[in-house]
């Protein structure tokens, strides 16, 4: 299975149309970095729906992100944090916080995780907290 072509998607996409694309990305025979790039785009589109992903998808995404994390790769960590923040993936954020409190990550990665944690707030976090829902 190939990665979905996120460039072909319209600006606004329904959550029901995005969910199968997330699952397709997770199961695609593609490089991990390519999957992260597609998930980053999909998570941005999902965030604009003002709907959280399903619990099943959140669990699968969190598992993928935990495996995709690299302790000394700041750009990868920042991409994962963006996905986590857009989708409200509390489990994945808890994992990164545990890693940041240990010595498993570089100082710059640790700093990025701690900054994101401050921005996201306490768990479980809602990426829409304080925002009025604007549905089209």
Image (tube, rainbow, N blue to C red):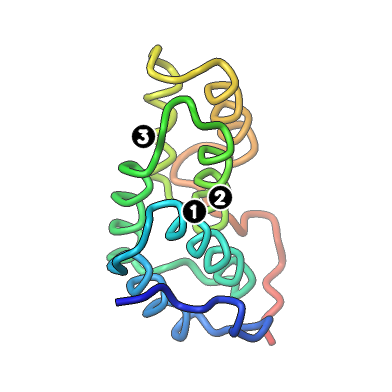
Query: Which residue is at 40% across, 70% downward?
Result: 22
Residue 7 image position (x, y, % from top left): 61, 78
Residue furthest toward the top? 103
Residue wearing tag 1 = 88
Q: Secondary structure at mark 2?
A: helix
Q: Residues within 10 Å of mark 2 (few under 14, many from 20)?
A: many
Instruction: Verify CB contact (< 8 Å) between mark 2 and mark 3.
Output: no
Give how far apart the Cα atoms at labels 2 and 1 are. Answer: 5 Å
Q: Is residue 44 above or below residue 83?
A: below
Q: Is residue 110 above or below residue 53?
A: above
Query: Which residue is at 58% across, 40% downward?
Result: 78
* Lateral position of residue 62 relative to residue 82, left or right: left
Of callouts 2 and 3, the N-terminal one: 2
Quarter of the view holding residue 31? bottom left
Q: Secondary structure at mark 3?
A: helix
Q: Nearer the viewer, residue 33 or 111?
A: 33
* Lateral position of residue 69 relative to residue 1, left or right: right
Q: Is residue 91 above or below residue 46?
A: above
**From the image, which quarter does the C terminus lie in?**
bottom right
Instruction: Verify CB contact (< 8 Å) between mark 2 and mark 1.
Output: yes
Residue 20 image position (x, y, % from top left): 37, 80
Residue wearing tag 2 = 85
Give how far apart the Cα atoms at labels 2 and 3 are. Answer: 14 Å
**From the image, which quarter does the N terminus lie in?**
bottom left
Query: Which residue is at 60% across, 71% downward?
Result: 45
Q: Secondary structure at mark 1?
A: loop
Of callouts 3 and 1, the N-terminal one: 1
Quarter of the view holding residue 11? bottom right
Q: Which mark is residue 95?
A: 3
Query: Which residue is at 52% across, 71% downward?
Result: 51
Q: Nearer the viewer, residue 30 or 118?
A: 30
Give how far apart the Cα atoms at labels 3 and 1 are. Answer: 13 Å
């Amino acid at each position: 299975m190939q990665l979905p072509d996120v460039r072909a998607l319209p600006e606004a996409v329904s959550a029901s149309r995005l969910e199968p694309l997330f699952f397709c990305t997770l199961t695609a025979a593609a490089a991990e970095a390519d999957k992260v790039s597609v998930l980053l785009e999909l998570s941005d589109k999902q965030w604009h729906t003002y709907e959280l992903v399903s619990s099943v998808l959140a669990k699968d995404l969190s598992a993928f992100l935990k495996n995709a994390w690299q302790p000394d790769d700041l750009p990868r960590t920042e991409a994962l944090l963006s996905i986590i923040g857009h989708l409200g993936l509390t489990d994945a954020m808890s994992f990164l916080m545990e890693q940041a409190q240990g010595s498993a990550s570089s100082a710059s990665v640790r700093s990025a995780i701690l900054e994101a944690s401050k921005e996201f707030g306490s768990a479980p976090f809602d990426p829409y907290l304080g925002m009025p829902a604007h549905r089209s």
